[in-house]
Image (tube, helix red, strand yellow):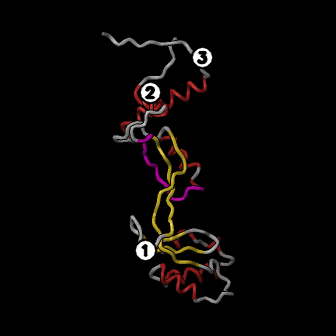
Amino acid sequence: MENINKYINIKIDEEVLEILKVWNKQRKEELNTKNFGTREPIYKVQRREYLPSHEEFGHDKVELCLEFGGDFNSFKDLDGVREYYHEDYFSSKEDYEHFMKLVESSNTIYRLHELIYLLDDDAEIMPNQCYLFYSQEVWKDQAYFLTYKEAEDYKIYQSHNLGVCRIYVDYPGYANRSTLNKFLEILDHKDIFEVE
């Protein structure tokens, strides 16, 4: 028996129709270019964070991190410290140069911590407090999207808030029979268009 598409007339806002058509088109293109094997994909932007952890207890690699008081920025290596702290963070060029000398004379973040700890508390250097802790890298969900392109756009216009981030492809969940899953199936496998 021949499969005949049946159409019904409904009233729909033009803006909603355009959004559905864009989602429909983009998701079909991205199924073969940005996603490999995930059914009904959902695109998530995730930010990298470091959670405090004990060095003996961790599911993944646990690393030593250095955090400067007041900034709440964690660094696993001296390169990160060099990149983040530039001259504008210091009250004078001399303070900046003094701090960079400490960094350059250290070969690990552990040694940098030791050198800063030995400074006089009244030293006019910023940052003058730092902490060492063991941490575990985790990726925290920040936002969810129906298309990869929207996730990429978000990474750009929210870059000042995100820091190190990535796009992760996920799915609605195992054996999910919800309306969301059905909606994604329609977007991915049906054509949305206007019938004259």
Q: Of helix, strand and loop, which one carries label 1?
A: loop
Q: Is residue 14 above or below residue 184?
A: above
**Residues shaded magenta:** 160-173
Which residue position holds label 1? 55
* Residue shown at 38% from the left, 41% from the top: 35
Q: Pointers 3 and 1 in contact (CB under 8 A)?
A: no
Q: Of helix, strand and loop, which one carries label 3?
A: loop
Numbered disc in front, either 2 or 1: 1
Q: What separation in Å lies between label 2 and label 1 (alpha carbons)?
A: 47 Å
* Residue shown at 68% from the left, 78% from the top: 92
Residue 150 visible in the snapshot: yes
Q: Quadrant of residue 4?
A: top left
Numbered disc in front, either 3 or 1: 1
Q: What separation in Å lies between label 3 and label 1 (alpha carbons)?
A: 60 Å
- Residue 86, magenta (yes or no): no
Amino acid type shown at disc 2: Ile
Drawn side of residue 64 relative to residue 156, left or right: left
Q: Position of residue 100 (x, y in %)?
A: 55, 80
Amino acid type shown at disc 1: Glu
Residue 30 visible in the snapshot: no
Q: What separation in Å lies between label 3 and label 2 (alpha carbons)?
A: 19 Å
Q: Which mark, by number, is residue 186? A: 2
Q: Is residue 180 above or below residue 14?
A: below
Drawn side of residue 88 relative to residue 62, left or right: right
Q: Position of residue 34 (x, y in %)?
A: 40, 42
User: In this orientation, which residue lies closer to the viewer: 143 or 88?
Assistant: 143
